[in-house]
Image (cartoon, grey):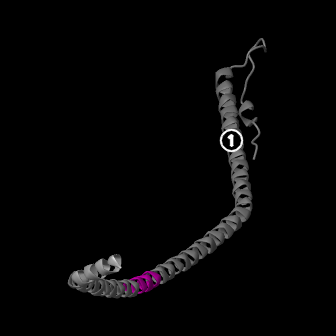
Amino acid sequence: MRKSISTSSYSGYKLNNDSTRIESFQDSTRVLQMNISQYEDTLSQEVFISSAYEHIREVRDLIFNSRQSMKPLRESISQLRYQIQSIEYQQRKDQINLEYDISLSIHKLKQKINQFEVVQTGEFVLLQDQIQKLQHEDQEIIQNIDTLEIRIIDLAPQIGQYTYQHYQQ
């Protein structure tokens, strides 16, 4: 795409009498500057386009490489998600089992407490019965003692006479 400098503009140049100066030097300089300017513009456009294409290729390569490097990362993330879900499922399962075990233990403990209360209540009733029997027996013993005291008091004169007679003999 490079353009060569046009030389057709030099064909109308005339030399002076002394052949050292060009009459249309300013015109030819201007044409030459325009040609150089066009060439520079074209060249800088080509350089810009070329560098833009190079940058585009680099970006495409980066995108491709990043996508390639993302695949293992995505796979790792997917595996981590699966592991997290598995762990969460196992934790929920363990929690449900633990709650069930705790509930079952509480139920068994309540049953033992109820059995203990029944046994204690039964033993308490037995103890109350025994206490009442002992109290009744105590009352009978007290009555028997009272009866014996009365008999002893009643027999005291007879015992006294018997003892007196026994000493006199």
Q: Residue at x 62, y 69 (%)?
A: 84
Q: Position of residue 18 (x, y in %)?
A: 78, 11
Please state which of residues 52 and 32 is positioned toward the viewer in this rendering. Answer: 52
Closer-to-camera residue (154/76): 154
> Is residue 149 shown to the viewer in this render?
no
Please say if 16 is above or below 124: above
Quadrant of res 31: top right
| Residue that extends furthest to the top in the rendered view of this protein | 18
Residue 34 in percent (x, y) is at 65, 32
Q: Position of residue 76 (x, y in %)?
A: 70, 65
Please identify the residue farthest to the front as the structure is shown.
Answer: 169
Query: Viewer-proximal residue, 71 or 29?
Result: 71
Query: Is 112 included in the stretch rendered in magenta?
Result: yes
Provide the major secondary structure of the magenta segment: helix
- Taking 151 as reference, is 46 left or right? right
Q: Quadrant of residue 113?
A: bottom left
Which quadrant: the C terminus?
bottom left
Q: Nearer the viewer, residue 105 or 151?
A: 151
Location of mark 1 (residue): 42
Query: Does residue 125 appear to the left or right of 97 in the view shown?
Result: left
Residue depicted at 66% across the width and 33% down the height? 37
Q: Residues within 10 Å of mark 1 (few under 14, many from 20)?
A: some
Q: Is residue 117 above or below residue 42?
A: below
Is 144 one of the magenta-colored residues? no
Q: Is residue 162 visible?
A: yes
Q: Amino acid at mark 1?
A: Thr
| Rendered residue at 68%/41% (across/down) | 42
Which residues make up the magenta segment?
A: 111-121
